Image (cartoon, grey):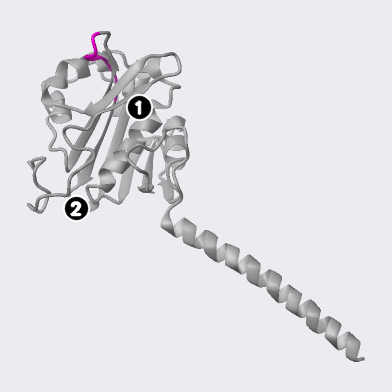
Amino acid sequence: MVSQDESPTGAPPEPLVFGPDYLEELELRDGRRLRLRPLRPDDKASLVEAFERLSPESRYRRFFTAKDRLTDAELRYFTEVDGIDHFALGLAEIAEGGGDGPGVGIGRFVRLANEPEVAEPAIAVVDAMHGNGLGRLLMLRLCAAAAERDIRWFHAEFLADNTPMRELLAGLSDDVVFTGEGSVVTCRMRLPNVPPDHPADQPAPPSAVTRLLELVATRLVEFRHRLQELTEELTEGDKSRE
C-alpha cells in the first residue's frame, strides 16, 4: 500500500490540496451545513449508517446488484485508503455541536494499475439529499484531487438507465465518450481543469484543446471576412477600369 507521504514511484509528492487535512464546509439552500473531508478508517460506522439511508434503487445503481449490507472487507476497502492511488471523500452533516453528523455522500477514485493516468470514480449520495448538486460537487472535487495526483482521465461504468450519472459526466468535460450496448455504459472522460474550490453550480472551464479549437475557429471566421472584403475590393477595382 502506498502511504500518503510518498508517491506511487516512491518520491515525495508536492504538497497536496486534497491531503489528509483537507476540509470544506458548505451550506445548502435550506440552511443545513455540510462538511467534506477525506475518509478515515474510523468512518466505518458512519458509512454503514449512510448505506442504510440509500434506497434499493440507489444501491443497485452503485453496486450493480441488490445489496442489503456492507461486508467487513468492503468497509475496510472503502475507508482504509492510501490517499494517492485510492482516494475517498466523505460528506456529512455538521452536528449542532460542530462535529460530524450523519453521512450523506461519498466519492472516490481508484487508479488503474495498467494505466497510471486513468482512474475509476464512484459517487453515492443518500436519496434524501438528491437535488442539491452534491453529486456534481463530489465529482468536481474528485477531478481536482485526481489531477494533482497526475491522473488525466476517468474511466467509469454505470447502468444504462442511470441517466443522472450520464448527464453529470457529460456536463463536466468537453472530452467525454460513452460506449457500450446492453445494460452497462462505459465512459472515458478527460478531466476538466477545475480549481479545488470550483463552485458546483458553475460549468467547468473548457479544456486547452477546446480553447485552441475555438481560437482557430475565430481566426478562420476573421480570415473569411477579410478575404470577402478583399474580393469585393478587387471586383470594384475591375469594374472601375472597364
Residue plotted at (39% across, 38% down):
198
Disc 1 to disc 2, C-alpha distance: 26 Å
Seen from the viewer's position, the closer of residues 100 and 136 is: 100
How far across and down, in percent of the image, does residue 174 sit? 46, 49
Seen from the viewer's position, the closer of residues 98 and 189 is: 98
Q: Residues within 10 Å of mark 1 (few under 14, many from 20)?
A: some
Q: Residues within 10 Å of mark 2 (few under 14, many from 20)?
A: few
Left-right relation of 42 to 133: left
Left-right relation of 160 to 50: right
How far across and down, in percent of the image, does residue 75 sit? 15, 24
Of the two numbered discs 1 and 2 on the same chain, state the one appearing first in sequence.
1
Residue plotted at (14% across, 34% down):
81
Seen in the picture, residue 21 relative to 67 is either above or below; the reply is below
Image quadrant in which you'd find residue 227: bottom right
Magenta stretch containing residue 104, yes or no?
yes
Helix, strand or loop status at disc 2: loop
Indicate the amino acid at tag 2. Asn
Visible in this render: residue 71? no
Q: Which residue is mark 1?
A: 61
How far across and down, in percent of the image, does residue 47 sit? 21, 19
Q: Which residue is mark 2?
A: 114
Query: Which image quarter is the N terminus in?
Result: top left
Residue plotted at (21% across, 52% down):
116
Give the overall secondary structure of the magenta segment. strand
Q: Which residues are magenta?
A: 97-105
Q: Are marks 1 and 2 in contact (CB under 8 Å)?
A: no
